[in-house]
């Protein structure tokens, strides 16, 4: 089984937004597309919500997190602007990676698809990585998505 992979802001150009932003549910994990429900709350975007950014950041808990999901009311950061991230198939509808050059849209559940209403980016690279498993390693395909997402003012 391939590992779920999200590497955020690989080029260091994203605006990190969310000094006082918190989650409104416990289903947000880094890498999902989110929208702002009000000035201080973020939720997972669906195909019918205009996305605000990509969930990003470390868990803000005093204990070691046992899950990558943010708790309800936990602080998080949204990546906005023009930037790149790496993703595995777990973040796409049907767990199918897009092809090079495909337009990327937000889909229900904060994942991505190659069709939809709100275009958020473009697939700019496909690559393979080696997953370390028992010292042998298994190849896993990833894609680089170049985002243009969220209003940056």
Image (cartoon, rainbow, N blue to C red):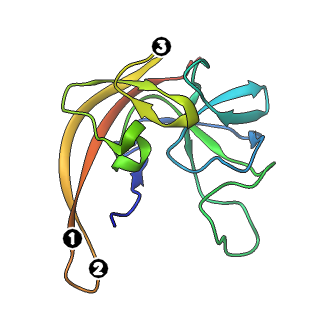
Element type at mark 2: loop
Image x and y of residue 118, in percent:
48, 16
For disc 2, the marked residue is 133
Is 15 in front, or is 3? 3
Residue 7 lies left or right of residue 109; in this view the side is left
Residue 111 lies left or right of residue 123; in this view the side is right
User: Which quadrant of the structure image shows residue 135?
Assistant: bottom left
State whether residue 128 is above or below residue 38: below
The label shown at residue 88 is: none
Task: Judge the density around disc 1: few (<14), some (14-19), many (≥20) Cα neighbours within 10 Å.
Answer: some
Marks 3/2: CA distance? 39 Å
Image x and y of residue 64, in percent:
67, 75
Marks 1/2: CA distance? 7 Å
For disc 1, the marked residue is 138
State whether residue 129 is above or below residue 63: above
For disc 3, the marked residue is 117
Sequence-wise first label, 3 or 2: 3
Task: Judge the density around disc 2: few (<14), some (14-19), many (≥20) Cα neighbours within 10 Å.
Answer: few
Element type at mark 1: strand
| Tags 3 and 2 touching, CB below 8 Å | no
């Amino acid at each position: 089984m391939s590992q779920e992979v999200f590497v955020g802001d690989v080029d260091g150009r994203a605006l990190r937004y969310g000094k006082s932003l918190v989650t409104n549910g416990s289903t947000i994990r880094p890498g999902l597309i989110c929208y702002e429900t009000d000035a201080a709350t973020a939720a997972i975007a669906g195909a019918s919500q205009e996305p605000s950014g990509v969930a990003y950041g470390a868990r803000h808990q005093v204990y070691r997190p046992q899950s990558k999901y943010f708790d309800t009311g936990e602080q998080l950061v949204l990546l906005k602007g023009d930037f790149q991230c790496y993703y595995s198939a777990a973040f796409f509808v049907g767990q199918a990676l897009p092809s090079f050059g495909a337009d990327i849209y937000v889909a229900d559940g904060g994942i991505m698809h190659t069709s939809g209403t709100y275009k958020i980016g473009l697939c700019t690279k496909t690559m393979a990585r080696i997953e370390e498993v028992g010292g042998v390693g298994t190849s896993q395909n990833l894609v680089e998505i170049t985002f243009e997402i969220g209003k940056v003012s």
